[in-house]
């Protein structure tokens, strides 16, 4: 009996601390830790994020050590879609805002921006394009849904070229063929390697191509 | 009668025990698309710099560097390692830090991968004469630059190890798969960014 009391006295604080830890999941069903996206942070942050769940600090010492780990379950469970698509869509907002921020940093202008995405999965490309257009609009830039058309013969030639030659040539052809009008600019988000999860931003303005650093 | 020990063993095996679990936190839980055995870094000279810190002594930094050297070599890179901020000298570095280099085509690109570790949080549990760390969170800062010093990638991987009641957890394998996968992905992304920057110069 004495041993039991001893164990309870020593372990109760530890058990109480971990009851609400989603990764330990003593009471709710344990999710796969890979399906949780967690950020460790100060207790104040948790109190701001979830004021109804995190109590204000106690006036008296209660011998519990508190720290905040804010977790949310992924929208789709781990491995529900290809890893590369998952990684890119996981940072959709980041990619869109980064590209828009780089375009905005070029300075004020009256250009109308077209957005194209070179990504193997069309559905992912559409999501990226939509998010980037929204991010550009949020920054006060003009955006159009027009797509810069290229002739089939151009596409056939361009598809055989490496990216460092293909993108500048495509830009020239879009400008020459009228796909990009005067006052238009093209923002291109491109993935250059089949295993890459980052995206690169390029610009086509007045027939000249450049990658943004 | 002979079944009794087997039954006891089966019961004990099925009982939950104290196990250590690895939980990837910010950065470390991102999906990885890279194939760790593919030639992702072929033709790249990689310098891996594992900087010691208060939470990571030089010996452990050296061990991390050696493991990363093997990781990048498996992906086709020529690797040098160091645990200091100074640039390793080509002849001295292998003897000093255990760096390795495989015979192959001369590298045409270079990357510098710098890693710094620190412990963000730890919780100690004491019981009678035992005192051990039952929960800790670490951060691994990774910075990748090209041969000119241009920043290609800056990421922070945060992970947590904690003890809990549970069944057999393959913690080391889980951690290795996620951590080395994330580092490889960062290196590949940095390589592609280097190519894009080089094309823009």
Image: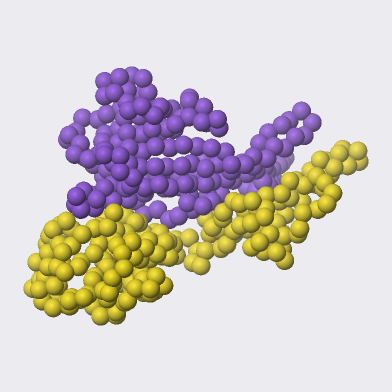
Chain colours: A yellow, B purple
Q: Is residue B167 left or right of residue A57?
A: left
Q: Residue furthest right?
A: A1
Looking at the image, is B104 positioned above or below residue A16? above
Q: Is residue B149 left or right of residue A22?
A: left
Please give the name of the residue rendered at 88% of the width and 42% of the height, measured from the top-left corner. A5
* Horizontal and vertical percent position of residue A196: 32, 55
Q: Quadrant of residue A154?
A: bottom left
Q: Is residue B85 left or right of residue A21?
A: left
* Horizontal and vertical percent position of residue A105: 33, 61
Looking at the image, is A77 positioned above or below residue B161? below
Quadrant for the N terminus of chain A in the image: top right
The one of B162 and B10 positioned closer to us in this rendering: B162
Please give the name of the residue rendered at 17% of the width and 35% of the height, measured from the top-left corner. B105
Quadrant for the C terminus of chain A in the image: bottom left
* Horizontal and vertical percent position of residue B2: 69, 39
Q: Tell me, yes or no, if residue A3 can be seen here.
A: yes
């Amino acid at each position: 009996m004495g041993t039991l009391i001893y164990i309870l006295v020593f372990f109760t604080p530890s058990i109480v601390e971990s009851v609400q830890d989603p990764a330990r999941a003593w009471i709710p069903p344990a999710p796969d830790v890979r399906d949780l996206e967690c950020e460790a942070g100060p207790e104040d942050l948790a109190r701001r994020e979830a004021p109804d769940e995190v109590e204000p600090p106690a006036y008296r010492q209660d011998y519990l050590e508190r720290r905040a780990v804010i977790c949310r379950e992924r929208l789709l469970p781990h491995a529900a879609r290809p890893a590369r698509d998952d990684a890119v869509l996981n940072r959709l907002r980041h990619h869109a805002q980064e590209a828009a921020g780089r375009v905005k940093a070029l300075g004020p202008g009256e250009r109308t921006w077209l957005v194209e995405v070179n990504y193997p999965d069309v559905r992912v490309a559409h999501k990226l394009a939509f998010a980037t257009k929204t991010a550009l609009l949020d920054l006060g830039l003009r955006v159009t849904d027009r797509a810069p058309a290229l002739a089939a013969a151009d596409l056939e030639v361009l598809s055989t070229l490496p990216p460092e030659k293909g993108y500048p040539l495509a830009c020239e052809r879009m400008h020459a063929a009228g796909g990009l009008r005067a006052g238009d600019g093209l923002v291109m988000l491109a993935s250059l390697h089949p295993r890459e999860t980052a995206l690169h931003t390029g610009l086509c303005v007045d027939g000249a191509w450049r990658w943004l650093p | 009668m002979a079944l009794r020990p087997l039954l006891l063993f089966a019961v004990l095996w099925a009982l939950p025990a104290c196990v250590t679990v690895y939980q990837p936190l910010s950065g470390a839980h991102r999906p990885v698309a890279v194939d760790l055995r593919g030639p992702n870094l072929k033709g790249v000279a990689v310098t891996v710099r594992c900087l010691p810190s208060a939470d990571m002594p030089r010996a452990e930094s050296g061990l991390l560097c050696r493991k990363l050297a093997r990781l990048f070599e498996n992906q086709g890179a020529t690797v040098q390692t160091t645990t200091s901020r100074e640039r390793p000298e080509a002849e001295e570095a292998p003897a000093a830090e255990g760096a390795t280099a495989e015979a192959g085509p001369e590298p045409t690109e270079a990357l510098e991968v710098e890693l710094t570790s620190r412990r963000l949080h730890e919780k100690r549990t004491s019981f009678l004469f035992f005192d051990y760390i039952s929960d800790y969170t670490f951060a691994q800062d990774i910075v990748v630059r090209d041969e000119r010093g241009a920043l290609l990638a800056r990421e922070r991987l945060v992970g947590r190890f904690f003890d809990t009641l549970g069944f057999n957890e393959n913690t080391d394998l889980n951690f290795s798969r996620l951590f080395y996968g994330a580092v490889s992905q960062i290196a590949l992304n940095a390589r592609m960014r280097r190519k894009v920057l080089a094309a823009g110069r």
